[in-house]
Image (cartoon, rainbow, N blue to C red):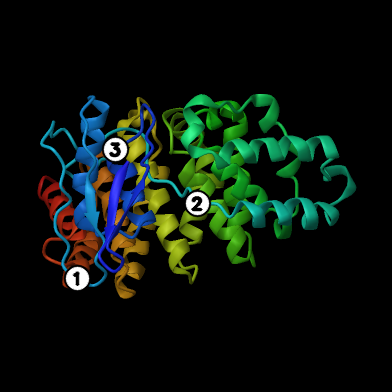
């Protein structure tokens, strides 16, 4: 547990930070900080605490949550300092994910609303609804993920759900992205079904006239497949083919101008996760130039838009994606990147993660 102090009330509350074998401590720390509204300056301390506890150390860190005031560094015992200090690549093939889900609303939409409107041949039976509810109950209990199982038989329900029309599919994609957050979720889908899930999600997200819920949940299926090693490996396999590039990666480029902050952040996360996974994968040498170009171009275009809107974390993730690609491709044109870095530096705080990321990308550029 981590103790969070709120000076407004004078009280403390303990919150759990869960991590599974193979998880990236830096990613978990960033997601934890975002979830509880913690200052970015605490991320490194949280990573250090995670690494300590993985090594059997003890101690409960305390975080000062003073709103709008200076915050003292989170106090933790000294321990091993093997936490990630660079902005890219991430420590391993896994990446960032989106793990909050309004379960009551999701299930109301699927069971009480949309299941009554879809074509008869794709309606869920009572038995299939029971299966879906069982999956959701498992997913609600994040602290029990290490002791729970999701099976291939259970995920086979998506063979029917993914045939729902675009107007009705967003709560289905919401459940699917959360299944991928379970340590056994991607494995339960299997390689072929995972590829099909990614293709359908991104195709639906990029359809002309697709509404925000479809766009956002579709992209977040793609980001969340990188939550665990097996899903990341499946995704890299899917993206190693021309069909995967066209149906999964190309929609990222198509969606860069979608006018929504959350969509931009999700797309930037997808770019970073893909670039990072390619860097770490054994298939780095067989990755198509089309994929690398698509991700690079998308990341730079997104970064430019994020800079205009002063979206620091989205900008950082885009540049981290580009940084990974620079490590993969040691040569090529970088003229557009130079201007993007200059513009990002104009609003980056001197000690921020964004400024660090900019500096690291410039180092990679200087090697070319």
Q: Earlier in the sequence, mark 2 or mark 3?
A: 3
Q: Residue at 27% of width from left, 42% of height from top? A: 26
Q: Would you place residue 228 above or below residue 76 in this image? A: above
Nearest the eye: 22 or 319 = 22
Looking at the rendered structure, the secondary structure element under dot 1 is loop
| Residue at which label 1 appears | 69
Instruction: Answer whether residue 256 is visible to the viewer in this image.
Output: no
Nearest the eye: 112 or 169 = 112
Q: Residue at 60% of width from left, 61% of height from top? A: 213
State the CA–CA distance, disc 1 to disc 3.
Answer: 27 Å
Nearest the eye: 27 or 281 = 27
Instruction: Answer whether residue 323 is visible to the viewer in this image.
Output: yes
| Residue at which label 3 appears | 25
Q: Residue at 77% of width from left, 50% of height from top? A: 111
Q: Would you place residue 297 above or below residue 257 in this image? A: above
State the CA–CA distance, disc 2 to disc 3.
Answer: 18 Å
Looking at the rendered structure, the secondary structure element under dot 3 is helix
Q: Picture coordinates of residue 121 (x, y %)?
A: 87, 43
Report the residue that reaches farthest toward the front: 10
State the CA–CA distance, disc 2 to disc 1.
Answer: 28 Å
Q: Picture coordinates of residue 110 (x, y %)?
A: 73, 52
Q: Earlier in the sequence, mark 1 or mark 3?
A: 3
Q: Residue at 13% of width from left, 34% of height from top? A: 81
* Label 1 crowd bin: few (<14), some (14–19), many (20+), radius 10 Å: few
Residue 100: image tag? 2
56 on left or right of 123:
left
Q: Quadrant of the N terminus?
A: top left
Tell me the mark number nearer the camera, choosing from 1 and 3.
1
Residue 163: image tag? none
Nearest the eye: 247 or 357 = 357
* Label 3 crowd bin: few (<14), some (14–19), many (20+), radius 10 Å: many
């Amino acid at each position: 547990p981590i103790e969070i102090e709120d000076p407004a009330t004078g009280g403390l509350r303990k919150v759990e930070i869960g991590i599974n074998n193979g998880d990236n401590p830096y990613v978990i720390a960033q997601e934890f900080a975002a979830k509880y509204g913690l200052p970015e300056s605490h991320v490194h301390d949280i990573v250090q605490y995670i690494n300590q506890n993985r090594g059997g150390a003890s101690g409960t860190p305390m975080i000062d949550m003073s709103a709008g005031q200076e915050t003292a560094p989170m106090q933790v015992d000294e321990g091993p300092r093997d936490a990630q200090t660079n902005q890219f690549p991430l420590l391993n093939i896994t990446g960032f994910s989106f793990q909050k889900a309004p379960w009551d609303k999701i299930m109301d939409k699927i069971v009480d609303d949309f299941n009554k409107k879809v074509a008869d041949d794709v309606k869920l039976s009572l038995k299939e609804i029971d299966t879906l509810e069982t999956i959701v109950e498992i997913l609600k209990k994040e602290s029990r993920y290490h002791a729970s199982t999701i099976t291939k038989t259970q995920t086979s329900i998506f063979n029917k759900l993914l045939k729902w029309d675009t107007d009705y599919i967003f709560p289905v994609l919401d459940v699917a992205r959360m299944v991928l957050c379970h340590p056994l979720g991607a494995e339960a889908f299997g390689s072929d079904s995972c590829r099909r899930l990614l293709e359908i999600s991104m195709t639906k997200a990029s359809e002309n006239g697709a509404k925000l819920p479809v766009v956002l949940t579709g992209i977040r299926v793609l980001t969340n497949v990188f939550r665990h090693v097996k899903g990341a490996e499946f995704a890299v396999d899917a993206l190693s083919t021309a069909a995967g590039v066209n149906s999964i990666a190309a929609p990222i480029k198509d969606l860069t101008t979608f006018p929504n902050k959350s969509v931009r952040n999700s797309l930037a996360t997808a770019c970073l996760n893909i670039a990072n996974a390619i860097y770490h994968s054994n298939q780095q040498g067989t990755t198509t130039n089309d994929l690398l170009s698509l991700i690079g171009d998308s990341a730079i275009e997104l970064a430019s838009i994020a800079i205009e809107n002063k979206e620091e974390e989205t900008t950082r993730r885009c540049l981290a994606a580009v940084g990974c690609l620079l490590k993969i491709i040691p040569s090529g044109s970088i003229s557009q990147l130079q201007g993007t870095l200059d513009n990002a530096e104009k609003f980056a705080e001197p000690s921020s993660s964004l400024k660090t990321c900019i500096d690291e990308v410039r180092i990679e550029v200087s090697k070319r």
